[in-house]
Amino acid sequence: MEPNSSFFFFFFFFFLLPLGHCFALQVNLTAGNELIEKVCQHSPHSDICMASLRTDPNSGQADMEGLALIALKVAHANATDTSQHIAKLLNNSTLDPFIEQCLTDCSEQYLDAVEQIEDSLVALTAKGFHDVDAWVKAAIADVDTCEQGFKEKPDYESMLTHRNIIFKQLCNNALAIIHDLQ
């Protein structure tokens, strides 16, 4: 190989080829971000939808089903985190008995919600979109029941209201994507 041709070979291999790969990756990420924006426009909480989908490094290359999967995984992680948070709250031995009962009920309801989101993940992989819809709505109903438990007595506030709202928003975003798939 002549010295000039060696130089061009190495220049191409080490400088131009990686630039082409970066350009292709950027085009793919741009297309992925456009799909996320398009999908989230139909969502009732578009800002949370876009932020939550973008947390997954694979979202830039995901199709609609992939975005639905990511949305359900984010909702699952949120429900799991809230379930753990409730368990920590229940470790407080000075809880008012009413609050303790509400938290115990919420703990059970969040465990159910986690299972229902897990069932919806399985249903999504089987393209059972109607089942996904039913499971996610059941998870939302569980969290609504958790919130309502605190309202049974006047002057008591739910310490989970903010978490309940976020979980429901994440679920509603997932449902919006699922409805686009049907």
Image (cartoon, grey):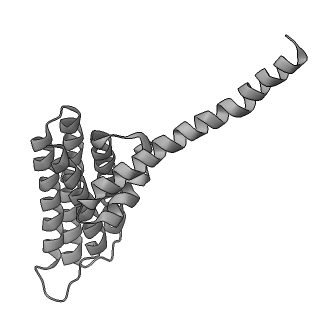
As drawn, the residue found furthest toward the right would be 3
Q: Position of residue 35 (x, y in %)?
A: 34, 49
The quadrant holding residue 93 is bottom left
Q: Position of residue 57 (x, y in %)?
A: 47, 45
Judged left or right of residue 37, residue 96 is: left
In the displayed structure, would residue 155 be above or below residue 134?
below
Q: Residue at x 14, y 72 (%)?
A: 149
The quadrant holding residue 67 is top left
The quadrant holding residue 146 is bottom left
Q: Position of residue 59 (x, y in %)?
A: 41, 45
Judged left or right of residue 6, residue 42 is: left
In the displayed structure, would residue 151 be above or below residue 24?
below
- Report how many numbered discs are placed on residues in the image: 0
In the displayed structure, would residue 111 be above or below residue 47?
above
Q: Residue at x 82, y 18 (%)?
A: 5
Is residue 57 visible in the rendered image? The answer is no
Q: Quadrant of the C terminus?
A: top left
Q: Quadrant of the N terminus?
A: top right
Judged left or right of residue 161, residue 5 is: right
Q: Position of residue 82 (x, y in %)?
A: 32, 61
In the displayed structure, would residue 46 be above or below residue 65?
below
Viewer-closest of 14 and 51 = 14
Is residue 154 visible in the rendered image? The answer is yes
Viewer-closest of 95 and 6 = 6
Viewer-closest of 72 and 88 = 72
Q: Residue at x 65, y 37 (%)?
A: 19
As drawn, the residue found furthest toward the bottom would be 155
